[in-house]
């Protein structure tokens, strides 16, 4: 049935902006691990991106309050935006701890995990863009499956990294600090999978 009240498609622009911030935050975190001498710069950059993500979320929720008809269910708009904001928050928390805890240098496991996170975040960006055309979501399922696979890889890396921490022993405080950083990084990857699950639910509702 034709409606004289148009559905507001501006939400998709906000989704794209939020997903772009997710990607840029993940890439900044990976560069931090690769170029550790400039870690303070990257931590500051990630903090800026966290604020940018919050602003986009606020804009989305404000628009939601002012919109009668939405392109997808309201709860799905809220959930998708919150999930993307969660990824950025986890990255921000992990990055800050590297400086707060005065970590002397990154580990191989951190480098591996940030690479996984970048791959997952880029797929999130692609998947979010495909929401504009739910009738023909070409390639979307493949992207979502790959995000799930990467989440499994992240879990395996995290388990191995933590096991290595306790196996090597050393300074108990440093072990605890690294475990927290590893867990936050792995949670950022997990949040990418949460986004994939939300998108899958949206597709099932709307196709």
Image (spheres, rainbow, N blue to C red):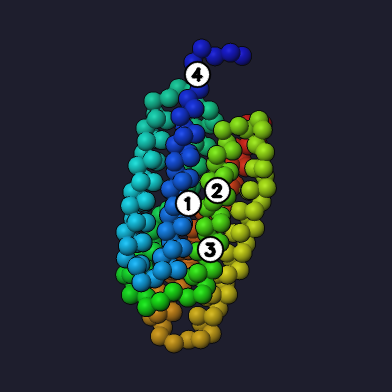
Q: Residue at x 58, y 65 (%)?
A: 155
Instruction: Tell me if mark 4 has few (under 14), some (14-19) or many (20+) residues whose alpha carbon lies within 10 angstroms of its own.
Output: few
What residue would you read off at disc 1? 23
Query: Does residue 57 sit above or below 11 in this rendering?
Result: below
**Residue 115 got which mark?**
3
**Residue 6 got which mark?**
4
- Place of residue 131 in the rendered image (x, y in percent of width and height, measured from the top left): 57, 36
Locate the C terminus by quadrant. Answer: top right
| Image-quadrant location for residue 167 | bottom right
Which label sits in the foreground, 4 or 3? 3
For the residues labelled 4 and 3, the Cα–Cα distance comes to 41 Å
The reply to whether the C-beta atoms of the residues labelled 1 and 3 are less than 8 Å apart is no
The reply to whether the C-beta atoms of the residues labelled 1 and 2 are less than 8 Å apart is yes
- Place of residue 91 in the rendered image (x, y in percent of width and height, measured from the top left): 43, 59
- Place of residue 196 in the rendered image (x, y in percent of width and height, measured from the top left): 58, 47
For the residues labelled 1 and 3, the Cα–Cα distance comes to 12 Å
Q: Is residue 86 visible?
A: no
- Place of residue 115 in the rendered image (x, y in percent of width and height, measured from the top left): 53, 63
Ranked by sequence position, the earlier of labels 4 and 3 is 4
Which label sits in the foreground, 1 or 4? 1
For the residues labelled 2 and 3, the Cα–Cα distance comes to 14 Å
What residue would you read off at disc 2? 124
Query: Does residue 69 sit above or below 117 in this rendering?
Result: above
Element at label 3: helix
Ranked by sequence position, the earlier of labels 4 and 2 is 4
């Amino acid at each position: 049935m034709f409606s004289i009240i148009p559905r507001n498609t501006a939400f998709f622009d906000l989704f794209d902006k939020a997903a772009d911030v997710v990607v840029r935050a993940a890439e900044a975190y990976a560069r931090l691990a690769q170029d550790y001498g400039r870690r303070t710069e990257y931590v500051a950059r990630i903090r800026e991106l966290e604020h940018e993500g919050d602003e986009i979320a606020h804009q989305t929720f404000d628009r939601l309050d002012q919109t009668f008809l939405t392109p997808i269910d309201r709860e799905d708009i809220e959930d998708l935006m919150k999930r993307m904001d969660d990824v950025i928050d986890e990255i921000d928390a992990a990055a800050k701890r590297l400086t707060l805890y005065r970590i002397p240098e990154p580990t191989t496991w951190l480098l591996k995990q940030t690479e996984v996170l970048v791959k997952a975040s880029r797929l999130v960006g692609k998947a979010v863009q495909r929401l504009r055309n739910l009738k023909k979501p070409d390639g979307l399922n493949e992207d979502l499956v790959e995000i799930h696979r990467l989440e499994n890889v992240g879990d395996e890396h995290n388990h191995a990294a933590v096991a290595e921490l306790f196996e090597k022993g050393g300074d108990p405080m440093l072990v605890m600090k690294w475990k927290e950083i590893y867990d936050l990084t792995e949670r950022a990857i997990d949040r990418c999978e949460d986004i994939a699950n939300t998108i899958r639910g949206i597709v099932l509702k709307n196709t």
